[in-house]
Image: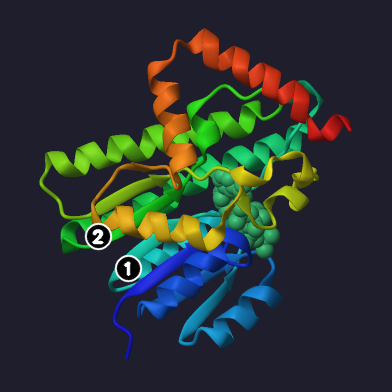
Amino acid sequence: MKEHTAIVTGASSGIGEAFARRLHREGYRLVLVARRTDRLESLARELAPAEALGADLALDGEIERVAVRIAAEPGPALLVNNAGFGAPGRFWETDARTLDRMHRLHVLCVQRLTRAALEKMVPAGRGGVINVASISGCFHVPGAVAYGATKAWIIHFTAGLHLELRGIGSPVRVQALCPGFTRSGFHEAAGMVAAAIPRPLWMTAEEVVDASLRALGRNHAVVFPGWTYRMTAALGRVLPRFLTDAALLAYSRRTNTRDR
Ligand SMILES: NC(=O)c1ccc[n+]([C@@H]2O[C@H](COP(=O)([O-])OP(=O)(O)OC[C@H]3O[C@@H](n4cnc5c(N)ncnc54)[C@H](OP(=O)(O)O)[C@@H]3O)[C@@H](O)[C@H]2O)c1
């Protein structure tokens, strides 16, 4: 009988699926959340005992349904807020409804589900929340402005929570996970040309999950998987903003995948 439950959003592919597989191996009972229920159900059968919970987490009512499911869990041990998507292109040319859905999914859903989990975890004195952000959240990224802004919110929110939990001496752990380019369904779903991205910059979803869980063991608040992205983040902290802005402007002109 598996005692610990992990809830993973966006478990139907990519990083979320890799989290689900790894947490199953580590002995967690899984609650898998996403919209593509056929994929979720087949994964839940493979990783039994696991529950497939179909939900569109860009809709208020569906977010609430998943929050209620978390609240009903006697001992949620881990929540991975991973569901997300990209919408590359100039901000003013991007569909307004898509931008709205992105903010609901990356901001309001992450906030609501984190609250539902911490409400149980903090009094119980155990548990962890991993909020999947992105290295883009540390920079101003032309062509992914709203995406980067929502991911910056996740980083700021999670790092603040980390401090708040430390302030009360809670053993509950929270982490903002900031991957760089990771092989998954992300780029295809966003209509991006992945071939434009240099090969050495790619990581696998399994490498990202491995880095995240290792860092959770050490209670790191903000995690950049892979040395390339750790260095990029460190440079972003020490270099003047005008230099990183200029570098990203040049990079975005070279790799603007939507204009090709
Ligand atoms: N891949 C990268 O290079 C990269 C880099 C940095 C950060 N990230 C972040 O990593 C996270 C996982 O992305 P990924 O790379 O694994 O891409 P992915 O393979 O496309 O997976 C995205 C997951 O999110 C789910 N999802 C999307 N919209 C949803 C919605 N409205 N409601 C419920 N679930 C939804 C998808 O499931 P359904 O379609 O079945 O709903 C899917 O399971 C995202 O937050 C992304 O921003 C990715």
Asked whether disc 1 touches disc 2, contact meaning CB atoms under 8 Å apart, the reply is yes
Position of residue 247 relative to residue 214, above or below, is: above
| Name of the residue lying farthest toward the bottom | 1
Of the numbered discs 1 and 2, the one sitting upstream in the chain is: 1
Spot occupied by residue 43 in the image (x, y as percentages of width and height): 59, 79
Spot occupied by residue 147 in the image (x, y as percentages of width and height): 61, 34
Spot occupied by residue 78 in the image (x, y as percentages of width and height): 35, 64
Q: Is residue 56 visible?
A: no
Label 1: element kind: strand
Separation of residues labelled 1 and 2 (CA atoms): 7 Å
State the count of labels. 2
| Tag 2 residue | 121
Name the residue located 14 percent from the left edge and 51 percent from the top edge.
Answer: 170
Q: Is residue 152 left or right of residue 100?
A: left
Position of residue 28 relative to residue 182, above or below, is: below
Give the quarter of the figure containing the N terminus. bottom left
Q: Is residue 217 left or right of residue 130?
A: left
Position of residue 172 relative to residue 228, above or below, is: below
Amino acid type for the residue under numbered disc 2? Met
Q: Is residue 73 left or right of residue 172?
A: right
| Name of the residue lying farthest toward the right | 260
Amino acid type for the residue under numbered disc 1? Pro
Q: Is residue 67 left or right of residue 146?
A: left
Q: Within 10 angstroms of label 1, few (less than 14), some, or many (20 or more) residues?
A: many
| Tag 1 residue | 76
